[in-house]
Image (cartoon, rainbow, N blue to C red):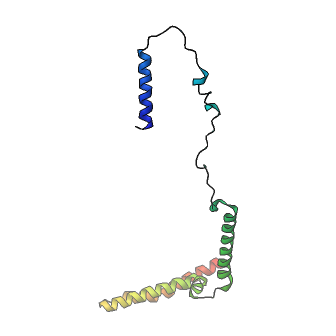
Amino acid sequence: MNKLSTRFLLRWTRLSLQAARPKSNKPIEPRFSRSSAYYGSDKLELKPSTPLYIPNYYDTDEFQNKRVLYAVISLGIFFAYFGYFREKNDIDQILNSEPHVLAGNLERKMLGNQIQEARRAGKPTDLLEAQLAYVDVKEAAIQATYDKRKN
């Protein structure tokens, strides 16, 4: 039997024996030897088998300092590369060019691709070629607007 069923059985038999005894009018005097104070339960210290908090390496100051140091070094390398060591490339030219040049070149490229696809499909390309000629006019208008805003 386990402890719980043993306790239940003992308590049940004690209660049944108390119920079977004749009641007396004499008050029951408490005995110190049967009290919990006699067994020292009032001075009992609970000592858990495992501590509530187990420290680890990731909570130490050393780890936190290393983390900050690595972040600073990584950012330093990032800024050094993009600020000083990186060579100029096509993307830099695109990002530094003026908007009218970007818009014009993009539209020319798109219309050129559409004209080639239409020729392969055997469709007329007159309208697309007229739009391609109109790109220069649009580019000049964008340039004039950009120059006004720039000044």
Foreground residue, 100 or 102?
Answer: 102
Seen from the viewer's position, the closer of residues 86 and 3 is 3
Q: Position of residue 96 (x, y in %)?
A: 61, 83
Please say if 37 is above or below 126.
Answer: above
Q: Quadrant of the C terminus?
A: bottom right
> Which residue, as the protein is rendered here, is positioned at the far left?
122
Residue 29 in view (yes/no): yes
* 35 versus 126 height, above or below: above
Say which of 150 and 26 sits in front.
Answer: 26
Q: Percent x, y for residue 41?
A: 61, 32
Name the residue at 65% across, 82% down: 81
Relative to residue 8, is residue 99 depicted above or below?
A: below
Q: Is residue 148 left or right of residue 106?
A: right
Q: Quadrant of the N terminus?
A: top left
Residue 91 pos. (x, y %): 57, 85
Q: Residue at x 41, y 25 (%)?
A: 12
Q: Residue at x 51, y 85 (%)?
A: 104
The location of residue 116, given as percent across then percent down, is: 37, 91
* Of residues 107 and 12, the one drawn nearer to the viewer in this rendering: 12
